[in-house]
Image (cartoon, helix red, strand yellow):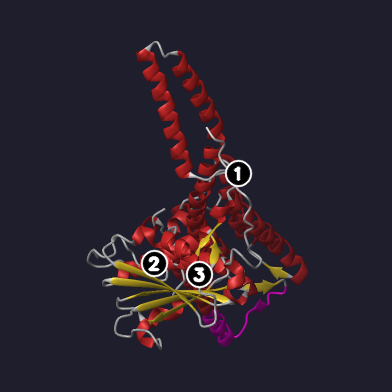
Amino acid sequence: MPQSTIRPLGERKRANWIRLRTMIFLRWIAIVGQLIAVMLTPYLFGIELEMGWCYFAIGVSIIGNLVAGFIFPENKRLSERQNMAMIMFDLVQISFLLFLTGGLNNPFTLLLLGPVTISATALSLRSTLALCAMAIISVSFLAFFHVPLKTVNGQILEIPQLFIFGQWIALVIAVVFTSAYSRRVTSEIHLMSDALAATQMALAREQKLTDLGGVIAAAAHELGTPLATIKLASAELAHELAHMPELREDAELIVEQTDRCRDILRDMGRAGKDDLHIRQAPLAAVIENAAEPHMDRGKEVIVSLNAADGAPSTQPSIVRMPEIIHGLRNLVQNAVDFAQSTVWIETRWNDDTITVRILDDGDGFPPQLLGRLGDPFMGQRRPRKPDKTRPEYEGMGLGLFIAKTLLERSGAQLRFANGADEVGYRSKQVGAVVEVRWPRDKIDAREGENAVSIGSNTRFAPV
């Protein structure tokens, strides 16, 4: 899937995920708690309440729940506006109950934070701001207007005005802080979830391409026998039709085309359903495979192989993991997008590590973003003018996140830098530098835990 088509899910679309049954269930829990509090408070604490109005407020919630439960199907999912309406109703209902039971003198005023928190985690920013404003208005109203709590002896229960003011300040701060905190954490989780889903899709696509080699090898193996039979039968038919030139030419054409099919299959894949050779390749071959889609985009891509001092000069053979190919491909794409004219891919290996550095002669990474590179959707900006060097680029940071996630899955460590900050690089030529380093035993196809044993391949039967 092209990266330009991958976007984080919108807030309104996420709000549509909430089932009506979930909201009804949560409201039933609140109703039961409210009934218990209203019914037991007069008997346990000797406090007189406006029972009629309290039951009226709770009854409205009960009727709303029953109507919603019977009218709508169980799998009904609420829209953004419906969710906001339900949460707003709950906020107003709780505020009305608090108005009947002492206002800010009632310790259960903390329940006003519930609807605000739900809104911050599930609804859009606009809906959350509206509910926060409503909660603050309710708290301010309850600070001045409420039905006082009275005991059966006529004594009014209230706390000093200084504590009422403190309660108001605490609730307003709690509304703002709780909503901001919940929204921030939830947004981070949603963005990471979207990015991981995109990474999984990219990996699945690369895995399909890798599996295609095995399918071709299996097809070449399975079709070998029927092609041999067709050639044998057509050759005998051509021999028997020696006295009929026209039919003999047709039989010889079948023999010729059978040989052609055999040659095509030999070119497409090796014999055997599970060709172990496709599981590993020289380091240069894997890098060229990753960079190949971006070789002809108007920028020069130079690949160099270097062995460290004291290391074997023969380049290592590594495991052909889809994670490595797709991760390096994204890094090369990023370098080609921003390069002025040249991209360098430098490899270096020793007995312990294999390192790949991707450099370009562009402007480099913005210094303020170096510490955040690899985070998903870190910048959702769009260029003001179309950039011909980066068609359809939207600057979301998803490509680097996918590359970092896939390469780290293969055991690599990534480092992002600018050439001007690196000692030993062509500081006047190099812009961005991305270094990918693997412990050799993680990807070496000849030694270590991922070594690929090369079995003997079965030859094609002669035809």
- Tell me how far mark 2 sits from mark 1, CA to CA: 37 Å
- Foreground residue among 121 and 257: 257
Which label's residue is closer to the chain start, 3 or 2? 3
Q: Which is more foreground, mark 3 or mark 2?
A: 3
Checking the image for residue 315, the label placed there is 3
Asked whether residue 211 is in view, the answer is: yes
**In-image side of 35 versus 63 (left or right):** right
Read off the residue under disc 2.
332
Q: Give the residue displayed 58% in from the left and 67% down from the top.
A: 444
Residue 68, image x, y percentages:
56, 45
Question: Mark 3 touching mark 2, by CB under 8 A?
Answer: no
Secondary structure, mark 1, is loop
Q: Is residue 209 above or below residue 40?
A: above
Marks 1 and 3 sit apart, C-alpha to C-alpha, by 27 Å
Q: Which one is in front, 129 or 7? A: 7
The label on residue 385 is none
Q: Which residues are magenta?
A: 153-170
- The residue located at (33%, 85%) in the rendering is 427
Cα separation between marks 3 and 2 = 21 Å
Residue in view at x 36 percent, y 83 percent: 419
Amino acid on which disc 1 is placed? Thr
Q: Amino acid at mark 2?
A: Val
- Mark 2 and mark 1 lie on one chain; the one further toward the N terminus is 2
Residue 242 lies, in percent from the top left, at 41, 14
Q: Residue 103: percent from the left, percent from the top?
A: 57, 73
Disc 2 residue crowd, few under 14, some 14–19, many 20+, Cα 10 Å? many
Task: Tell me which amino acid carries mark 3.
Answer: Gln
Is residue 398 visible in the rendered image? The answer is no
Which residue does the numbered mark 1 point to in the structure image?
458
Classify 10 Å Cα crowding around label 3: few (below 14), some (14-19), many (20 and above): some
> Which of the 4 image quadrants contains residue 109?
bottom right
Q: Is residue 242 left or right of residue 229?
A: left
